[in-house]
Amino acid sequence: MLTASVILRDSVKNTDLVYTYKVPDSMSEIILPGQIVEVPFGRHNGTKDGIIKSVENEEYQGKYKLKEILTIKDVVPVMNADQLKLIDYISKRYVCTMGDAISLMVPAAVANHQNPLVRFVKLENKELALELLHSNKLRSINQINILTYLLEKNVVPASELLMNTSTNNSVLTPLKNKGLISVYSERVVTDTVSEDETTVPVTSSHTLNDEQQKAVDRICEKRDRAKVFLLHGITGSGKTEVFLRSAERYLERGERVLYLVPEISLTPQTIRWIRSRFREGVAVLHSRLTDKQRYEEWNKIRNNEASIVVAARSGVFAPIDNLKLIIIDEEHDSSYKSDTHPRYNAREIAMTRAKMCGATVVLGSATPSIETYYAATNGYYELLSLTKRANPNARLPKVTIVDMKEQVKLGAGSFFSIPLRNSMAKAISENKQVILFLNRRGFSRTHICKDCGEPRFCPSCSVGLTLHNNRYSSDKLLICHYCGYTETLSSIKCDSCGSTEFTSIGFGTQQLEEEVKKNFPGVGVLRMDQDTTTGAGSHEKIIEAFRNKEASILIGTQMIAKGHDFPAVTVVGILDTDIMTSSPDYRGSERAYQLITQASGRAGRDNDPGEVFIQTYRPDNPLVLYAACQDYESFYNSQIEYRKALALPPFKASGELVISSSDEVELARISGDLNKYLRDFLGFQSSDCAFELYGPIPAPIYELRGNYRNVFNIKAKNRSLVIGVFSQVLKDFDYTIYPISIDSDK
Ligand code: ADP
Ligand code: ZN
Ligand code: ZN
């Protein structure tokens, strides 16, 4: 007997199992793993959609009477073998249901794609129809209308016919029985994404320099096991050229390529450019596609019509067979990590896929994440370096570190220093452009000493403390988001100068916009952040407007730091350096370094030399100095030492669990329950105490969309220990609990 293992597409905790169904004889020839099927499920003749995980041909030994699969919804499988293997990996690694894993891998646009079979009605006997109509033998006005319509059109989709004649299906049957009409189904080809690429010339490629050539040769060596490279090169060193050349070689060998880039860099411009370079066989996946486009691109991939897939984060799940090269450009970029449950990391999935299919992975960055650089310098990955600018004529911008303490004393205000303001005014008067960076929307405000600028750090974790309201008194609290260390605002004294005067710094993009308008009346300003880019295509509109010089000043978050080319920009200001370096997250410094590097890359791309201003209250902060002179090695060394001292990834695994409720009292109660549970569970797990548990601690953003949130942090020797704890918690607790992150050991 043929049976199939089926996972429900929308499985929840209680239905997240592999179910066995009988395959009816009529399907035995066409059933395949990866197909979407409809199966009977539950009582009252309920049905559900599922994915065939595997098909078995052996006697069923179980004790239940097997139900039969009802229909195969699409004969072409929606998941390939790699993806089916990934279901288990994803649900374990990210502590989610197998249904969640399937939703990640099969976009709704594909899974819900209405049966591409369309029903048509055709007039079969014209003479008889005319005769009947003329002889008034037909009693039904509906039948008359249908025949009249068909005499005009001959063949029409059933839906059109029924709609235009205001009839329903039942009217067709007697006509069919009389042999007047036939009804049949046919697959219709939907039209593809229209591409306007006729005018784009194929970009001529450069002669590679020695370092580039060596990198391409290493990447393209034939190998039959997975291997990971880090291509580390300063901005402008020609990494893109290395990626494209390598991709070309793989394609020549008939092997397929996945090229991942941060969502924001998939502008229509770059897409057109990539299409021109590879002509046929490019599929593009990003979040701004319509359902129809997404379906088409996806179909191209599963039908092997595309040999290179250029995609944002979720493209890592694309059903690419014979995948042999995975490129991850800007590998450090935070957009590779999903910000909704399950919070998968595309970089990690890429590594797992590569192992499964023996592919080569190339990570590229000017500012690699600390974990990646650690892996590349400790024998886990191979390091390839590009140390020179590819275009020797390109000039580096002049970087100035501005001491904001001095500036405030001079009366400059906390937004713009005097040198930045002067340079902005000069640039604007010369018809040049300015970009001002803020790290984020300004949720959290950082507390710094009014006299020396030293931020308040947690004494044991060295991350910035976050300001919270105190429920029991008006004295506010400063809380460490990792270990829960707490102090009251009125009781603190600066560690470096002893002052008791503190002030909070930090402002949002919106406030900055108002300030800019006040300082530069009549000058055009554009703002790009999460608030101004919610609509489809709004990114591009802002970027195009700025490129077309519709405004002189662009204010933005990290979004605009990536890859954009604005030739007229000569001045760049980085305004909230200290907020990043003293953020409540141990990756804050890393982000600051990355932002400063990338932002600097935006200044003076054309012939005019660029100027970069880094505003800070701590001008002697080594991190800022390293970033200003692009000394990645020194920066990395300082960070890896810090991580080692505090047992953070990659030395230990660290995981964060968030628990939320719309009722604060309820939150306190369940946090207490979970705390007790965790302590019992962890104590029971290991007598030599392999775990460190902190919590409950108010989340850095305590109140979010009407919910109050607490976090627990767990550190353990390795990742699987943390995952083990998390999956047990999720099984045993019914509250809204989500793993936010499980950052890896190596
Ligand atoms: P990265 O991705 O490392 O920031 P790009 O690949 O964008 O750098 O290259 C920077 C510039 O140098 C681009 O304008 C590119 O066309 C040019 N370039 C790349 N490789 C070469 C080369 N071998 N010779 C001359 N110019 C090059
Ligand atoms: Zn001080
Ligand atoms: Zn702490």
Image (cartoon, rainbow, N blue to C red):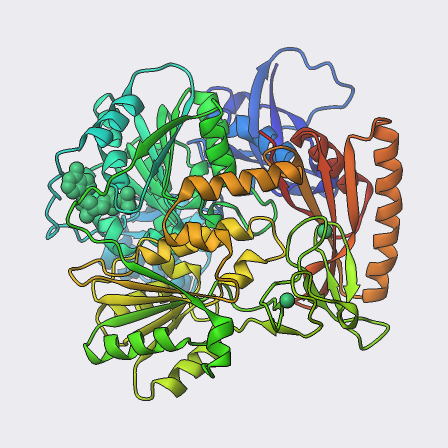
Q: Is residue 202 left or right of residue 595?
A: left
Between residue 32 and residue 95, name the one nearer to us: 95
Q: In this view, does 59 lie to the left or right of 217?
A: right
- Quarter occupied by residue 68: top right
Q: Is residue 437 left or right of residue 37?
A: left
Where does residue 547 sit, x and y in percent of width and height?
Answer: 24, 67
Quarter placement of the C terminus: top right
Where does residue 310 sit, x and y in percent of width and height?
Answer: 33, 41
Q: Spot the residue most to the front.
A: 497
- Quarter occupied by residue 733: top right
- Residue at horizontal 51 percent and vertical 56 percent from the top: 621
Where does residue 101 sit, x and y in percent of width and height?
Answer: 57, 38
| Residue 118 appears in view | no
Between residue 166 and residue 594, name the one nearer to us: 594
Question: From the viewer's perspective, is residue 504 above or below residue 335?
Answer: below
- Residue at horizontal 47 percent and vertical 37 percent from the top: 347
- Residue at horizontal 24 percent and vertical 39 percent from the top: 388
Quarter placement of the N terminus: top right
- Quarter occupied by residue 398: bottom left
